[in-house]
Amino acid sequence: MPKAIIFDVDGTLAETEDLHRKAFNRAFAEYGLSWHWDRSLYRDLLEVSGGKERIRHYDDQQIADHLPAADRDRFIREMHGVKTGIYTQMVAAGEAHLRPDVRELIESAAANGLRLAIATTTSLPNVEALLGAAFGTRGMDYFEAVCAGDVVAHKKPAPDIYLMALEELGLAASDCIAIEDSRNGLLSARQAGIPTIVTPGIYTRDQDFTEAMLVAASLEGIDVLSTYSENQ
């Protein structure tokens, strides 16, 4: 049996990607930019992991309305910080909801001594906001290791964030199971050697999940521990 479950956050714990998209657009408006990311565009932009990296990538592709060339990195960091503030306010206001059976899995795993961790490219304040809204003040306490944001050199699909989670847990990859929603996340977990269940979200349903141990519409009705055992 696995000793730990390592969760991605956005699109996995909750269907938050469209909230992120709206928060980006509100931040762009506050900075006087004409940028607007619709759902079709955002689906493509999600191929780039990390919000700051996504902004930089989009700016690089623009013909006009570029970010200030002088100290662009600082500008991106500041604008991304504004976006994060907008997003966390939206989550605190109740606009994000856990996906089916996510709560049940987290609570039952914790009650039965299974260790829990998070490995995500989203920033720590976003994680704290979502877990706080979903579980209250005990939300972060469920997770022994929370690896988030810019704590590693290379974001998903690189394995760095999962390798960090394994190091903090002190476990081998074969002792864990990862739960993801995207191909970048799947590749990250698998390159770290971790068996992975994928529950695609609204932006990732058409992606290739060949390397997954199981692909399901959600965790509803899925026995994660049995799935792990049957595939070892």
Image: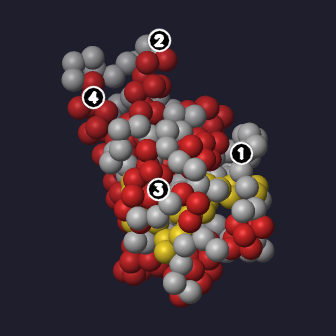
Q: CA distance from mark 4 to mark 2?
A: 19 Å
Mark 1, residue position: 211
What amino acid is labelled 2 in the image? Ile
User: For the residue labelled by badge 2, is the local secondary structure a helix, a strand or a loop?
Assistant: loop
Q: Is residue 32 visible?
A: yes
What amino acid is labelled 4 in the image? Asp
N-terminal label among 1 and 2: 2
Q: Is residue 218 visible?
A: no
Which is nearer the eye, 5 or 230? 230
N-terminal label among 4 and 2: 2
Q: CA distance from mark 3 to mark 2?
A: 35 Å
* Direction top: furthest residue: 63
N-terminal label among 3 and 4: 4
Spot occupied by residue 32 in the image (x, y as percentages of width and height): 35, 31
Q: How is the image coloured?
A: secondary structure
Mark 3–mark 4 CB contact (< 8 Å): no
User: For the residue labelled by badge 3, is the local secondary structure a helix, a strand or a loop?
Assistant: strand
What amino acid is labelled 1 in the image? Glu
Q: CA distance from mark 3 to mark 1?
A: 18 Å
Q: Residue at position x 39%, y 77% from top?
A: 141
Mark 3–mark 1 CB contact (< 8 Å): no
Mark 3, residue position: 119
Quadrant that contains the N terminus? bottom right
Label 4 crowd bin: few (<14), some (14–19), many (20+), radius 10 Å: some
Q: CA distance from mark 1 to mark 4?
A: 35 Å
Question: Which quadrant holds residue 217?
Answer: bottom right
N-terminal label among 3 and 2: 2
Question: Which quadrant holds residue 30?
Answer: top left
What amino acid is labelled 3 in the image? Ala
Q: Residue at position x 64%, y 42% from top?
A: 183
Mark 4, residue position: 73
